[in-house]
Image: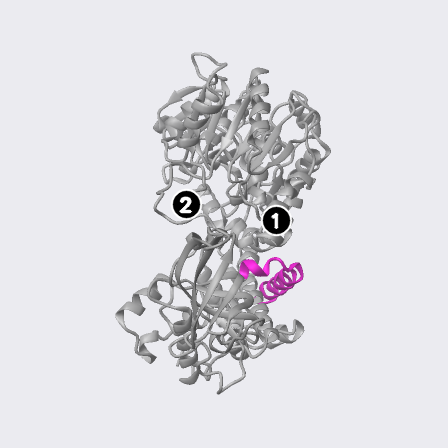
Amino acid sequence: MRFKDSLTTHLRIDAVHQKALQRIGIETVGDLLYYMPARYEDISDVQSVGVLEKGQEAVVYGQLSGLKSRKAWKSRKPIAEGYVEDGSAKMKIMWFNQPYLAKMYNDGTYVKLAGKVAGSEGKLYLSNPEIELLDSLPIDRHDSIFAGTEQHDDTLYPVYRETAGITSRWLYHTVLKLFEKGALETLIDPIPPSILTKYHLPELKVALVWVHSPKKAKDAEAARKRFAFEEVFYIQIQKAQERATVSAAQTYTIKTETRHLAAFTSRFPFALTTAQDNAINTILTDFSGKRAMSRLLEGDVGSGKTAVAATTAYAVVTSRPPEGAGKKIEYGNLQVAYMAPTEILAKQHFESFIEYFHHLPISVGLITGSGCMKFPSKIDPTKPTKISKAQLMKWVKNGEVPILIGTHALIYKSVEFKHLAYVIIDEQHRFGTNQRKKLAKKDARMPHLLSMTATPIPRTLAFTIYGDLDITLLDQMPAGRKPVKTTIVGPGQSKEMYEHVASELTAGRQAYVICPRIEEPDPTKENSLNMKSVIAEAKRLKSDVFPSWNITALHGKMTPAEKDKIMKQFSEHKIDILVATSVVEVGVNVPNATNIIIEGAERFGLAQLHQLRGRVIRGTYQPYCFAVTDSKSEKTRNRLKALVTAKSGFELAEHDLQFRGSGQLYGGKQSGLSDLGMEAIRNLKLVEAARTEAKYLVDFHPDLIKSFPLIAEKVARLGEVLHME
């Protein structure tokens, strides 16, 4: 049996199960063996319902049924009641003064209950049990939850993520069948024995047994550590290969005189921070080297990343191509491409660059899906003008437009540069070597790359996902920026918040209100009632809270033209309150907006909340953020309190990594990491070890296919997962 074999070659699987397996990406033997349990259930303390006695503290696994609420006959106290059945017997459960529990759970739900047995002989019940929802019962339930436990002493059972048509139990027993049929017999471990020994990792055969059917929690933990290392290791190898490719490529060597840069930055309406100066100097040092720069610039919202980008762009566009150096012939200047994630942001950067470069004989172009513009206009040199895409592309191709700003439209085939030396990417960190080559097209030289983000990234995540990039931090804010005063607003505390915002509006300021949804949810669907929607909230605020103020909704389903129009009106103060989804999270710049209300704050990651509140620190007025939550959970409120106490976005990101896990924070699909890999990046030592070993492997074995074919195959399968498609 080989990992590449189809499951149906070795097992009889019906059509329903085959379809369900395809939905979760399982087709081969290897796919199933690498489908890791989400968690484990320890049933060593579980009792059978059929043998429970009065006064006993019990832990029970089973299925709920007969849920309803009523009032006690004498005291009239509200009660939620129902039954739990574990296959051995059925027992009543009762929650006193918690009638809502009967509506929170459905009949047939799998649960783990922990509570005290009360009642009288023949009428026993589980009193006020704590309840934990399960995807499935940890073991076979056909006759009893304890079926089969006589044969072995295992009390630790894997719980897998399920899909329609497939249960966790089915997956577990199918894996065991593969083991029985010899799936591990011909297995070769791709990780070199020296690495396994060095970091005390189990070999592949042992790790697969331990991860799917562990005897002890320690075994499961060791196996998961091994697979987490393996996953991060392959990604680090891919990143090390990319770094090697960039290092080997020709690039543009750019040298600029300090006095010219000083003259450029002296026109800024603010003084550069020490952090900005350091970032600029680091980038200029990279420019003067022999290999193309690959750098990630991290900085909180408002820390001045655009000023760094503009200053370093100035150094590039005032430099001549190598073939023009020292000659009298006019060869034009080197070029810069600046890519933004949205049209709103691309236009905003276009306007910023006009401010930075309007005094110089340097043209700036803009290309988005809805049209092209160029500065300066021939008719009015102080303003930009709309031009045809064909004309702009002609000027970019012959080098007459040194700076081109745009969205993904920048990498269309029709966009060609003459001497593209510098690529700046805003909030698109997975833009990789292949995309750079696409932009440079016919040029044999690799352009320098600066990727910028306002998303605070934990160090381990940055090492893993952006392993091919050097990292620079902007950890200072410009002078005059006031820190946001953040308040957590719980149930029934909205009145003071609205009064404060009204006073700010009266003083001439503006406000954002952020909602998790665009439209009202279907009231018939479970767990959908408590999330406020943009459209309904805008109407409610207008009719009930701020009737005298101009309120408008903005969300992702609108066309770019509609969004642009609304943002223009908001920036011109024709709108007082903008009710939006997190579409305003990245880059929107309205200095007069000083208040932001974030509804359902518990539904956002701390890093995202930090970015959202960054919308109100663009000016010199005192900014305010209100994080509104209906949650009564102490854990949730403690997590949100970090917004008030953390000194920076980076501190918040580390906090959120521990509280929520990076999978929820950044999304496994977005990062290219599985849940296990995302879990692993909490471990800095593991990530650093994987990075060190990957670098050594690529440095000393550049022909990976020849030296380590199994590793080369695994890395090849990653493809461009970590890059923008």
Asked if residue 689 is among those painted magenta in the image, a careful observer would answer: yes
What amino acid type should be assigned to the residue bearing mark 2? Ser
What are the residue bounds of the magenta stretch? 677-701
How many numbered tags mark residues here?
Answer: 2
Which secondary structure lies at badge 1?
helix
Q: Residues within 10 Å of mark 2 (few under 14, many from 20)?
A: few
Asked if residue 196 is among those painted magenta in the image, a careful observer would answer: no
Is 316 displayed left or right of 102 in the figure? right
Q: Residue at x 69, y 37 (%)?
A: 281
Q: Residues within 10 Å of mark 1 (few under 14, many from 20)?
A: few
Which secondary structure lies at badge 2?
loop
Residue 317 shows in this picture: no
Tell me, for residue 634, which label it has, or none. 1
Q: Residue at x 46, y 54 (%)?
A: 101
Is 71 displayed left or right of 236 in the figure? left
- Residue on which disc 2 sits: 528
